[in-house]
Each structure stands twice: as structure tokens, then as C-alpha cells.
Image (cartoon, rainbow, N blue to C red):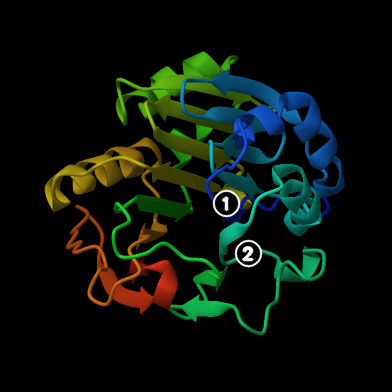
Amino acid sequence: MASAFEGVEKRLEIIFSASTSNKNLREKLTRNVLHQILKPVDCKIEDLLSEDQVDAYLLSASSLFVFDDFVILKTCGNTKIFECMKELIRVAAREVNSVLYTRGQFFWPQMQPDPHSFFIRLIPISQKQWHILSDFPHAADNNTKEVLTVELCMRRLDREKASIFEEKTSPTSEKMTEASGIGLIFPEAKLSTFAFSPCGYSMNSVEGKAISTIHVVPEEAWSFASFECCGYEFKDDESLQQVVARALACFKPKMFTLAIRSNLPVIGGEPQCNLDPDGYSCKREICSLEKGGSVVYYYTV
């Protein structure tokens, strides 16, 4: 167990109010500033992809995305994601509109530092396979444009697919990207990739205002991969299903959970997603986040 690695990520999203100064979040949260903010979390920056609307950081333990008015941080392992919140909010120097914390079911919850594995107010979905903790003190109104966030957590990866993310099979992150088909999920996106030694892989991509990220732990006993995209405008269920199918095809997991979250704070505003991933038997649930929107959730059975 000493060498086991927790691939399931903790995800923190903080949305701030519009700026009343000339500086946006990206100007305040520079690489040097973030380097210091992330130290208590116990992770560091490995790479940066900076585009017109977002700075995408690859971390030693997943990813960080900084937009003009919100931040998405994902960390795996035994990182302490909440340790950065106070300083993030202080540096941002803006009113917080909403905070959202999500995570999948840990392989080893007892190994997580307090309080990261337990919350009284955490909302469990589907026998504790996916969890939400949220607060929306100044949530968006009904005129807000819908933004979909897709979180896919995959376990028990196909062994041939998982072996692609081992250094002895693919010596560079570019070879891992090509051999796995990850580059085909969003073919027009710009990618930043990183290969860990002796195994493991991370990817961030940016396409305009939209982002995606993938992280892979290929060891057989605790194999895990995550895929997330945010900000893409899917025209219909079919286009969303194609993206999910491409992500699943990269890993061929035996189990997965899929959460599709809308930010619309209106009753009946949940995404009308009716997906049917080929080769899988799934159940579907809907969870309301009240002012924070809602989630359509799928899990394998």
C-alpha cells in the first residue's frame, strides 16, 4: 500500500464577481504568485499554456485553470486543496459569487488529510460514487448564459490502453497522446502534456474559452483516469455523446461515473442529457444544486 497512489481528484471551483479595477484574475494570479499559493497544497507547477482567455497550468498533482473571473483547481494524491482557498481569495480581492467542491469516491479515503474525505454537508450521489459540496452566496441570475461542465471518472482501465501511459512503452508525453487517441477528443484544441516517471500522464487543452483536462494513473491495482471539459457549446446530446465516447475509447474502463453540470440556477434548467454510451449499462440521476444549477449523473452498473 505504501506505493499506492490516489488518482481520484478533488476539484475546487471559485467564481468571483466582476472586477472593479483594471486587473483581472490572470493579472493577479501570476505563475510566481501561484507557486507560493500552491505550496501548502503540496503540489507545484510543471507547465503553463497561456491563451487569450485562460491560463492552463499542469501541476505535479493534476491541473489549475485561471480565467478572468474564476478558478478551477484539481489535485490528486494526498494533496490539501483547501489550504489555498484563503490566499486565493485574498489575492483576488473580489467578492466570491460561488464555491463548488466535487470529488469521486476515493480508493483510500482513510489516507486523505482532514477534512478532505468527509463533510457533513457533502451531497453523495449514487451510493457515494460522486460527491458535491457547494455554496452560492451570490449566484448567477436567470439571465446567465449556460455553461456545461463534464466530469468523467474511469476505473479499471483496459490493460493495453493503460500500458500506453508507462515510460517503457511510450517514452514521451507526445507519444502517449498520439497512441492513446487523446488528441482526437478535441482535435482543434491546443495541448499541454506531461509524462511522469515511471508512469502516469497529464494533459490540459484550451480552445478559445473552453478547456479540457485528462489525468491518468495506469497501475493495474488502482488504475484510474479522469477527463473533464468545460465551456464547450454542445449543440445536442449526440455531439456530447461523441465527446464522451472518444474519451472512453482512450481508456476502455470497466467502470465510470459521468457528471454533467449546468450552472443555470432555474428550476427545470438541468441539462437535458440522454446519453447511451456503447458497451455500457448505466443508470441516470438528476441532482439539484438549487441556486447553483443542477447535475445529470450517469454511473455504470
Q: Name the residue under label 1.
A: 16
Which residue corresponds to the image point at 44% horizontal and 45% vertical from the top-left? 228
Task: Indicate left or right for 215 with 95 as reference.
Answer: left
| Location of residue 221 in the rendering, given as x and y in whole percent from the top left corner | 62, 52
Label 2: state its secondary structure: loop
Sequence-first tag of 2 and 1: 1
Q: So how many labels did they put on this image? A: 2
The image quadrant of residue 262 is bottom left
Mark whose residue sits in front, 2 or 1: 1
| Location of residue 65 in the rendering, given as x and y in whole percent from the top left corner | 57, 37
Which residue corresponds to the image point at 77% horizontal and 64% vertical from the top-left? 112
| Location of residue 173 in the rendering, given as x and y in whole percent from the top left corner | 55, 19
Task: Indicate left or right for 94 with 292 as reference.
Answer: right
Up the image or down, 288 lies above or below 106; here it is: below
**241 vs 208, nearest the viewer:** 208
Q: Which mark is residue 106?
A: 2
